[in-house]
Image (spheres, rainbow, N blue to C red):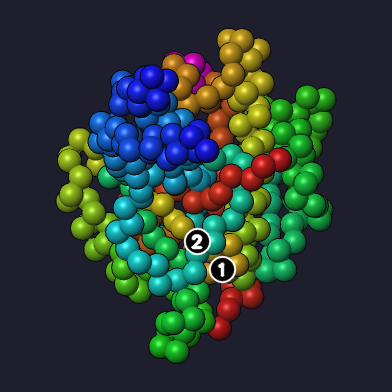
Amino acid sequence: MAKFSKKRGSASPEVSTASLPDIIFMLLFFFMVVTVLRDSELKVKVSTPYATQLTKLEEKSLVNYLYIGRPTPKFQPVYGTKPRLQLGDKFASIAEIPLFLEKHKVKVPEAKRPRITSSLRVDGEVTMGIVQDTKTQLRKSGQLRVNYSAKKRAD
Amino acid sequence: MAKKSSRDRMKNEINAGSMADIAFLLLIFFLVTTTIAEDKGILVRLPPWSEEEPDIAKLKTRNVYSVLVNAQNQLLVRGEPMDIENLRENAKEFIMNPTKREDMSESPKKAIISLKNDRGTNYKTYLAVYNELKGAYDELWEDLCQRRYGVAYSEELPTAYKRTIKEDIPMILSEAEPTNFGEEE
């Protein structure tokens, strides 16, 4: 009986909160590292194909993204189901690519401009027609470093 | 007497000194295990735009490895249908031509890969074909690098090494304008 009451009395000392800041900082760092800032909302469905010979893109600021895919169900009543190009956060036509590239270019320091890469994030189910038109337009605009975005395939 | 001593012991706080260490340990654990979402892909260099079509006719046919992908996603390699699984090995054999066959490339320097697709070809198939062709070259570079320098081929290799390797086995891939078959309406 006495033993039981003793145990209940022992609950009073509190756990030290001295390390709480550390835990909070840890969580903060964790989320800082993991979070990817997404600048544009996807209006087309993009599920990139799988490949093995991949290269990592190093500097994020030197990359501009071109999305090609079918509009998501939300946009299908307006834009139909034909594959479309998305630049930034809106649908665009092939003719708008040079302006888009130029807008990105002015934000990059002069010395780094030759290393600007265009990342083509293209849905696997899209036919080559629109991709080809995009490539031709990129070549005409002198943007020759291109990355076909793909996921790693385990062999 | 016994009761008093027990309460005294409970008044002691838990030693928080090591909590920071535990926190750092967890932090490091997460840092190591988390894969940060990153963009990977096949990096290519497009040829500069020119109005006139490149003249492939003046090249010797034995040096040209033509790959056609049609709107049904089928492969035609040098006039023969082929499965994509065999493409890499076949391309490697063509480029190096180890048995000095008359109908394969004179030397790796002269080998040219010509890739042509329809507008109706699936992007997935196109990329898979491109991946195999690049894979063939990657494997050849790897082989040469191992033989010459005894190290694995990677992007971190000294530029001089990479240059000599790419001089001996340059990757020349020419893409023709696609034909208008199977375009989606």
Say which mark, if any, is on residue A126. 1
**Of B45 and A75, the residue lying toward us:** A75
Q: Is residue A91 above or below residue A23?
A: below
Q: What is the CA distance from the residue labelled 1 to the residue labelled 2? A: 7 Å
Residue B137's x, y, as percent?
A: 62, 33
Say which mark, if any, is on residue A56. none
**Of B8 and B154, the residue lying toward us:** B8
Q: Is residue A104 above or below residue B178?
A: above
Which amino acid, by three-letter code, is at mark 1?
Val
Residue at image position (62%, 70%) is B120
Residue at image position (63%, 73%) is B181
Q: Would you say B60 lies left or right of B18 here?
A: right
Residue A98's x, y, as percent?
A: 28, 61
**Quadrant where the C terminus of chain A lies?**
top right
Q: Chain of mark 1?
A: A
Which amino acid, by three-letter code, is at mark 2?
Val
Give SS at disc 1. Answer: loop
Residue at image position (43%, 31%) is B26
Q: What range of the chain is rendered magenta?
A: B159-164
Residue B182 in sight: yes
Q: Chain of mark 2?
A: A
Q: Is residue B14 magenta?
A: no
Residue A144's x, y, as percent?
A: 38, 48
Q: Residue furthest top?
A: B149
Q: Which residue is mark 2?
A: A122
